[in-house]
Image (spheres, helix red, strand yellow):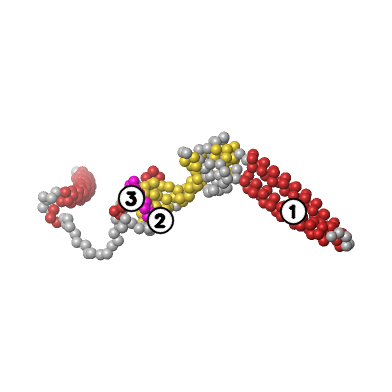
């Protein structure tokens, strides 16, 4: 019987210890849960307080009847200082090229035999653009060369005759008049030879004028000439060939007369080209000294590259 009591006591003690251990675990879990819930509430409250402050500040700016509206300063004070003041006026103008070449024949107008350029084509200075009729000029060159060759033949004969006459004179044969006459003929033919050479050079230069070249580098903006037509440079409808060099551009605009005293050469301008999505700063390079009779305005030019 005593042994049974001892077992009972041990069993009771075990149950008591087990029961106490389970209670401690439950208490720890409950504390952790409450702490987590408390931290969450604190975080929510901080976020809510910040949103409240933000809304209050916005209301104070928008609502003039707000109690805190008087705290917002609508007027401030700033010390007076010297600063640059720039005032701009808006004007509309157009972009133009600084280097524009209207091609014309170097000689007389002539009939076009060949066209070597097309509208919109890029050309270089010295490039052949047109070929004009040169049949008559070639005949003149041929005639001048034939005349030159004839004078050369005569000069050769005159020199030979002079040398023979001089040899006879050295031997005491002949007269001095014959010697002087032979020498004069040689000198006269030499002068004629120089003149004939000049005529040949002039004829060749005239033949070169039938070739029409570009004076500048650029774009063939206008080519209104065809084979068979007469090229004279400027026709009834305007230039027959126009070369535009776009490396140096200018903006041309008219300014009202009442701004005459405010604008001067070198004044800074801002140029805006919306189509090209481009803005740049430049200065006025030219102010016209005359007033446009149709618009009553001055002409301004702003150059840029």
Frontmost residue, 177 versus 226:
177
Which mark is drawn over residue 189? 1
Name the residue at 31% across, 52% down. 257
Frontmost residue, 97 versus 146:
146
Query: In the displayed structure, does residue 286 sit left or right of residue 188?
Result: left
Q: Element at badge 2? A: strand
Name the residue at 40% across, 55% down. 286
Residue beneath disc 3: 297
* Residue 287 in which image quadrant: bottom left
Main SS, magenta region, reads strand
Residue 45 visible from this viewpoint: no
N-term-proximal mark, 1 vs 3: 1
* Mark 1 vs 3: CB contact within 8 A: no
Image: magenta residue range: 282-299
* Mark 3 vs 2: CB contact within 8 A: no
Residue 7: horizontal and vertical position, in percent?
22, 45
Residue 129: horizontal and vertical position, in percent?
56, 42
Whether 127 is among the magenta residues is no
How many marks on residues?
3
Query: In the displayed structure, does residue 105 sit left or right of residue 58?
Result: right
Frontmost residue, 288 versus 271:
288
N-term-proximal mark, 3 vs 2: 2
Frontmost residue, 87 versus 36:
87
Question: What is the CA distance from the residue labelled 1 to the residue labelled 3?
Answer: 68 Å
Question: What is the CA distance from the residue labelled 3 to the residue labelled 2?
Answer: 17 Å
Residue beneath disc 2: 285
Residue 54 visible from this viewpoint: yes
Name the residue at 36% across, 56% down. 268
């Amino acid at each position: 019987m005593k042994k049974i009591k001892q077992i009972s006591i041990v069993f009771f003690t075990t149950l008591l210890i087990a029961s106490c251990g389970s209670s401690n675990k439950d208490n720890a879990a409950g504390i952790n849960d409450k702490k987590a819930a408390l931290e969450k509430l604190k975080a929510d409250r901080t976020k809510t307080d910040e949103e409240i402050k933000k809304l209050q500040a916005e209301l104070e700016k928008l609502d003039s009847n707000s109690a805190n509206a008087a705290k917002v300063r609508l007027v401030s004070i700033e010390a007076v200082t010297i600063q640059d003041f720039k005032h701009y006026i808006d004007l509309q103008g157009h972009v133009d090229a600084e280097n524009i070449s209207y091609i014309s024949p170097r000689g007389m107008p002539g009939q076009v035999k060949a066209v070597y350029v097309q509208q919109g084509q890029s050309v270089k200075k010295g490039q052949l653009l047109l070929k004009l009729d040169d049949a008559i000029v070639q005949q003149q060159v041929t005639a001048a060369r034939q005349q030159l060759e004839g004078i050369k033949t005569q000069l050769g004969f005159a020199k030979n005759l002079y040398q023979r006459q001089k040899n006879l004179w050295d031997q005491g044969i002949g007269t001095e008049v014959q010697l002087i006459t032979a020498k004069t003929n040689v000198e006269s033919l030499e002068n004629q030879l120089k003149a004939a050479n000049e005529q040949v050079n002039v004829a060749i230069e005239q033949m070169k004028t039938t070739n029409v070249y570009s004076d500048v580098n650029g774009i063939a903006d206008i080519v209104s000439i065809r084979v068979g037509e007469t090229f004279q440079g400027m026709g009834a409808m305007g230039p027959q060939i126009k070369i535009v060099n776009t490396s140096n551009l200018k903006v041309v605009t008219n300014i009202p007369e009442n701004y005459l005293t405010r604008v001067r050469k070198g004044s800074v301008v801002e140029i805006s080209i919306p189509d090209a999505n481009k803005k740049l700063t430049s200065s006025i390079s030219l102010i016209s000294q005359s007033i446009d009779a149709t618009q009553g305005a001055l002409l301004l030019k702003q150059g840029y590259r």
